[in-house]
Every structure is written in structure tokens, then in C-alpha cells.
Image (spheres, rainbow, N blue to C red):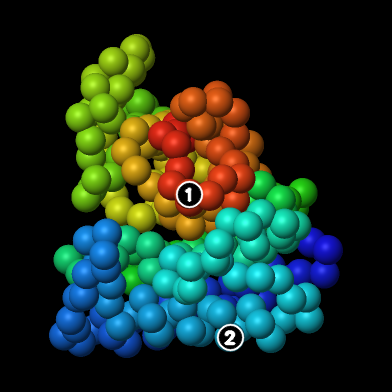
Amino acid sequence: MLNQIDIQNIVTIAKEAGNAIMQIYKQDFEVEYKQDSSPLTLADKEANNIIEDGLNKLSVNFPILSEEGDDIPYEDRKHWEYFWLIDPLDGTKEFAKKNDEFTVNIALIHKDTPVLGVVYAPALDICYWAKQGEGAFKDGQRLPIKTVKQRNTYKIVASRSHMSDETQAFIDAIDTSKKKELILIGSSLKICLVAEGEADIYPRLAPTMEWDTSAAHAIISESSGKLTDQISRKSLKYNSKKELLNNNFIVTN
């Protein structure tokens, strides 16, 4: 089934959504707040419509689970073999702050594992993609780009908007002979920085949702890195429970 999908078609869909986001980004826009107090903008909605329309036009048709889509009961989705998991605008807080650190995330999940992922940062015009068995790429350049030997410092990435006390304690406890360097950045770009070898580790000891991580999870996996569930000590699983909240995790390369 996976071999029937040309990942460049998914890249095109992500970039079309990104272009729509940027049209709104350049203007004044209103920010709404959902029941869980997370922000929502017209850009989230526009991008979601473009992605869903694009995926539905592909020759293969899979269910779509989106942050901005309908709430689908676990009793229905637990039987899915393949499905799209999307976050049309990951990093809405960064979007609202206009700091450019937001992404379009599109992942294909097989049972409980991401097997394809596209992460596009429209304000930066950077695109990461990966397909199981075919490697991971940043704008066509194979990942990882840097190795640990090419990094003079021990680079740690963490959330710009969601730093927790637990994450800070984890960072403080890291034992390394190199000087520690902390990079604060929004959205799935954190995982992608580890995937490309620009950073060593990304500890996330604070809440995330499955659509926040799935696309970049496919990318880190194909770049020979790991995204490890801190409870099971195994790779993070998707659509394996009623709640779509991730356990805490650590990303390494």
C-alpha cells in the first residue's frame, strides 16, 4: 500500500497548505481559543481544508484524523490499518507571535507506526520528508547532514512555548564532556533538528498530541534516530488508545 504513494505529492499538498497559511500570516488575524485553551486561527482551518481535499484526491484513500477535523471515536478508528494523521498548523502560538517557527505536519500511520511524514515550515520555506525504507530528506538533501563529530557543543532543543520544570531538570542532569547549548524553538522543527544532526537531543517531558509528533517521528526514524516513549522505553505508538495524548518522550540521533 505504501508503495502506491508518491511522497512528492504529499510534499506538494503540504506546500499548498503552507502557501495559504502565509497569505493569512502576512495580514492581521484573529486568534480564537478552543475548549482546551489552545489557540486556533483561520490559517488552521484553511490549511486543514486544503490538506484534506488533497489527500482525498489521491489514488489511495485512507481515513483522515486531524487536530482540526471531526472527533472520531476510538471504537471506529482502532480498526484502521492505514490512516492520515495531520496537524495543519503545528505551533499556532508561534504563528500568533509571528516568529516563523510553525509547520504543516502530514503523516501516514500503519497500524501504530508512522511510515511517511512531511513537515513543511512555510515561513522559512524548509521542507523535511521521509518514507519508510527510502530515507529522510531536508529539501532533497539526505539526513542526517551533520554527525556528532561535527558538533563542538552538546546541543539540546526544547520548546519555546512549553518548557516544563521536568524538562529543565532533565537538561540540567545531562552529563556530557562538551559544553551544553540550549536551542529554544517551536513546533516539529525540534524533532527535525535532531533528525538532520543539528542537535543531539530533544527531551519532551510535557504534554503533546499524536498529530504534533507523527510526521517528524517518521523523519527521525528514517534518519537513524529514535523517538522513545519514556514509560515503555520503546518507540512512541499511535492510535493505540482512546486518548490521543502522547506520553513524555526523548528524541535522539
Residue visible at 53% across and 49% down in the picture: 242
Q: Is residue 58 left or right of residue 233?
A: right
How far apart are the alpha carbons under marks 2 and 1? 26 Å
Q: Nearer the viewer, residue 242 or 37?
A: 242
Mark 1 surroundings within 10 Å by alpha-carbon count, few (fewer than 14), some (14 through 19), many (20 or more): few
What residue do we see at 27% from left, 59% from top? 36
* Residue 235 spot, x, y in % from top left: 59, 34
Disc sitting over residue 223 in the figure: none
The one of 145 and 244 positioned closer to us in this rendering:
244
- Specify the label residue 53 is tagged with: 2
Residue kind at label 2, given as amino acid type = Asp
Coordinates of residue 2 in the picture (x, y in percent):
79, 61
Vertical placement of residue 152 versus 44, above or below: above
Eyeballing the image, is 126 above or below 210? below
Q: Label 1: which residue?
A: 243
Q: Is residue 10 left or right of residue 93?
A: right
Q: Quadrant of residue 93?
A: bottom left
The location of residue 76, given as percent across then percent down, is 65, 62
Quarter of the figure with the N terminus: bottom right
In the displayed structure, 1 sits above or below 56; it is above
On the image, the x and y values in percent for residue 229 come to: 51, 32
The residue lying at 26 percent from left, 27 percent from top is: 166
Amino acid type indicated by mark 1: Glu
The quarter of the picture where residue 13 lies is bottom right
Mark 2 / mark 1, whichever is N-terminal: 2
